[in-house]
Amino acid sequence: MSLLALITWITTAGGGIYLLSIWLIEYDKDFHAVAATRLPPPVLAGHVLLAGGGLVVWGYYLLFDEDEAAWLAVLVLCGAASLGLVMAIRWIGVYRASRTRARLAAAGRHGYVPGLYRPEPAEPPERNFPLPVVIAHGAFAAITLTLVLLTALGVGGS
């Protein structure tokens, strides 16, 4: 079960790196003074550092089979999951707003009154996150947390 946890953790990290790369490509500090990101850089960095650090601790546990390392990995992963949940909740608003704007544009209504200039609102960088990747990242994260916790509890052997 501990190796399965490692595989799901690496898969989760791959999806997270993909989402992070989209965010980094789209993020422009000067432009987004108008449309600030809903995923603040300190929260995003904390999530990445905790998840990556937990993966290193999990690798240590796998190499040396020390129970304290498994529990430390659980604790660190819970912190990463908490920050990830906060970011997911904040991202839902961005996703819904982006979908609403796309539907209005497709219907020919652009959200402005004719004769009155209103520029299109700037959108945050996370508007381009693909929904399937976000869902897969969250699902694999939940599976990883469950497997790591079960392994730390001694269920299924180590």
Image (spheres, grey):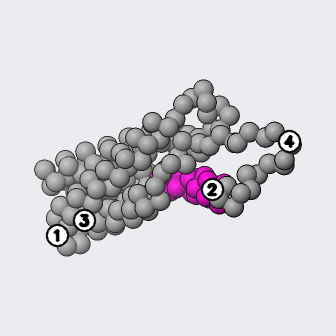
Between discs 4 and 1, the one toward the N terminus: 4
For the residues bearing labels 2 and 3, Cβ distance under 8 angstroms: no
Going by the numbered disc 4, the residue's amino acid type is: Leu
Q: Quadrant of the N terminus?
A: bottom left
| Residue 101 in magenta stretch | yes
- Element on which disc 3 rests: helix
| Residue 11 in magenta stretch | no
Residue at the spot x=23%, y=57% of the render?
6
Mark 4 lies on residue:
116
User: Is 43 above or below relative to 29?
Assistant: below
User: Is 26 above or below relative to 138?
Assistant: above
Residue at the spot x=25%, y=45% of the render?
56
User: Of 105 and 130, which appears nearest the observer?
Assistant: 105
Going by the numbered disc 2, the residue's amino acid type is: Ala
- Element on which disc 2 rests: helix
Q: CA distance from mark 4 to mark 1?
A: 68 Å
Q: CA distance from mark 2 to mark 1?
A: 50 Å
Q: Residue most toward the bottom?
A: 156
Q: Is residue 132 visible?
A: yes
User: Of 49 and 98, which appears nearest the observer?
Assistant: 98
Q: CA distance from mark 2 to mark 3?
A: 45 Å
Residue at the spot x=74%, y=39% of the render?
119
Mark 1 lies on residue:
157
**Neighbour tally class for label 4: few under 14, some 14-19, many 20 plus, Cα within 10 Å:** few
Q: CA distance from mark 3 to mark 1?
A: 7 Å
Question: Is 22 on the left-hand or right-hand side of 125?
Answer: left
Q: Give x and y (percent) for residue 93.
A: 62, 55
Mark 2 lies on residue:
102
Q: Give the residues in magenta.
A: 83-103
